[in-house]
Amino acid sequence: MKPISVPTLKVYRQLFAACPLKPISYQEQTCIQTDYPRISCMARTQGHVSQGARTIILLLACLAFFSAPLFARDVFVMLSGGDTPFDNNYSQYLQAKTITAFFQQNYPSNSVWTFFGAGNVEGQQPVFGDVHRQRNRDGLLLDSWIPGSLPRNLPARHDLILRTFRDEILPAVANGGTLYLFVGDHGSRTHGKNPESIIALWSLSPDGASEHGWRYSRDESLSVTEFRRTLAGGIGRGRIVFCMTQCHSGGFHYLAFPRTPTPNPKWFTVMPDYAAPKNQPAFPAVAGFTATDEMSPAAGCDPDPDPDKWAGYERFVPENLLGINLFNSKPTTKALHSFSDAHIAATLVDNTIDKPYSTSEQYLERWANLIETRLAKEPNLTTKVRKQVAAYQRALDGATPKISDPAFRERQAQFNRFINRMTEQNFGLRTLLVAGTRKELEAAIDPANVDKQTPNRRRPQSAPQARQTPSKRRGGGGAPAERRKLYTDTIRPAWKQAVESNRITNLPPAALEFEKYLLSREDQGSNYFSFRGAAALQDEVFWNSGYSDPQTLNPAKAEAIVRWGAERRSQIVIWAFTSTDTNIQAAATKLMNSMPELAHASTLSPDLSTPLLSEDIAAARTLFYRRVLAAWQFLLAVNERPALAKIHELTELERTPLPQPQAQHR
């Protein structure tokens, strides 16, 4: 019989020595369960051990048998909804694939959950082509779709995710374990009263009654409020460390605390209403990191990554955390121990539109907001507090806080590293970031707004704008009525007649049939020609190419349809330009002159990226750092112990290391 493992024997020695049983670690619990058959055999053995020893072994056997419900374990969740096959970019699949592989290879399979896209499972027949990938073919960016298959993958659907959290994930950590949660794209924000961040999930589900066998749902998202309620209802003594890379992800820091802190009544000579105690929902023990704030998009919204140009928190965090290249899984650097370490490493190299920060920093920003919107205008502050509000304002203008608190100084040094790196990425911003006042930083963030207030302000040295996040599935500005009339009244009737009379001979059969279908839909009012119709055309390309069903896909037919979708607009105008009919030729000439983008409609887009960090993003990050430190300085000066304790609690949770990888689970 194989010997019992060392971690199990460690627990056994505690029992045998009548020591108080310490909390059983993740590794010890796993080993106890693995050793259960051998422990049971020993317990049944008679004669070679004493009665006391047999009693201890029996107790250990009971621990092994009941360890799953009694002892918490650490669990690992990868969640990436993707929204639709048009938005679920290949970069998101690479991210999810890499994180899932690490979790699956290093931790027990019953402690790992993956929710990605439509739920394609590695090793099984794919159910849907849910990952959008663009490829360069002869100078064209052609769409394609592949099934995003992952081991033991589940569909990223709202009801399934919440049910799995309630029934499996949260019970596993409720007795003191840690949930390591990694969330990919996409994200958005609700509208109307009390808007909040949401995680976009997978919005398609099978439906035999629908035209293509699938239907869209507008309700596939997970809001901060709903997720907080679910976590608080089952987390128990467990805790959660997260990393989120989606747009508007910063709103999920409010899983851990209310949006508006309540000031200490002792700060006032006459207590205002906003200082009165408030009823708050239950907040779970949760902290982590996000790619940006709740109001902003993130770089991860960019479509298909180019190995040389794909940049942003979405890529930099997993690559630094795991020490590998997301494209080929080859080692690049030493792996890091925590989401916190990966966040710092990623922020130092992220020169995109991202604005990465942590939960503890968001907590301090909320205090900064209270100081700016309430305390700075409050007439009934005590003298001490009013003095500290003034110190807060000076810190925002660049005065360096003189604080001896070690945790404060550590964060201050971290922010200085971030600012120094930004000046290295764009040296023209150094004066603004290091010595600029609050007004100058605000002017760089939103020049139009500040110009209205201070038209003669000193303008900091500018830098080229970094690539901005593209709008998802939007066409261009669309053709005015005259342009549309040129197509619908002059060019289209002749083009349709040529197609139906088989006079278009340079199209593959699949593309020709697809064009006949598009013309029939245009007869019913659909718009596939103007740039406003780009999303509708892409929709038709996806469903008619066959990419939605990987099991029946005909690659040659699919590429022919995709290529025609990319070239259709320009090819129709070129055909019209070569027509012998002078009216058709004249209409094509007018379209070409008024729509120069037609000449480039099917070619690769120009590279809009730049290695320089943009001025507005650098200024926004810098002002955020100043506000965080100034609020912390204020709380230290007034000795607001509950808030200071919360900062410490959140920071410690953020720094939770990943468990030591267990080679035996590979």
Image (tube, rainbow, N blue to C red):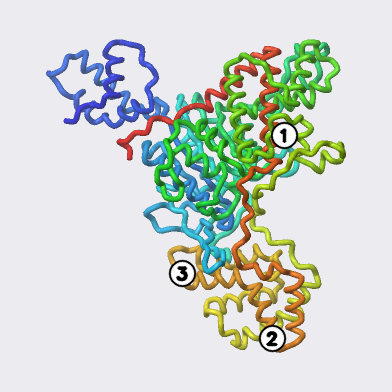
Q: CA distance from mark 3 to mark 1?
A: 53 Å
Q: Is residue 140 left or right of residue 42?
A: right
Is residue 542 placed above or below 379 in the rendered structure? Answer: below
Q: Is mark 3 in CB contact (under 8 Å) with mark 2?
A: no
Q: CA distance from mark 1 to mark 2?
A: 58 Å
> What residue did someone put label 1 on?
432
Q: Residue at x 53, y 28 (%)?
A: 654
The C terminus sits in image quarter: top left
Q: Is residue 370 left or right of residue 135?
A: right
What kind of residue is marked 3? Pro
Front position in the image: 428 or 27: 428
Q: Which numbered disc, 3 or 2, marks the residue closer to the eye?
A: 2
Q: Is residue 447 left or right of residue 402?
A: right
Is residue 443 placed above or below 533 in the rendered structure? Answer: above
Q: Which mark is residue 579?
A: 2
- Of callouts 1 and 2, the N-terminal one: 1
Q: Callout 2: 10 Å neighbours few (<14), some, many (20+)? A: some
> What residue did someone put label 3 on?
555
Q: Residue at x 30, y 36 (%)?
A: 664
- Of callouts 3 and 1, the N-terminal one: 1
Q: Residue at x 77, y 11 (%)?
A: 384
Q: Residue at x 71, y 82 (%)?
A: 493
Q: Quadrant of residue 480?
A: bottom right
Q: Is residue 584 visible?
A: yes
What kind of residue is marked 1? Leu
Percent coordinates x, y for residue 231 in the rendering:
55, 32
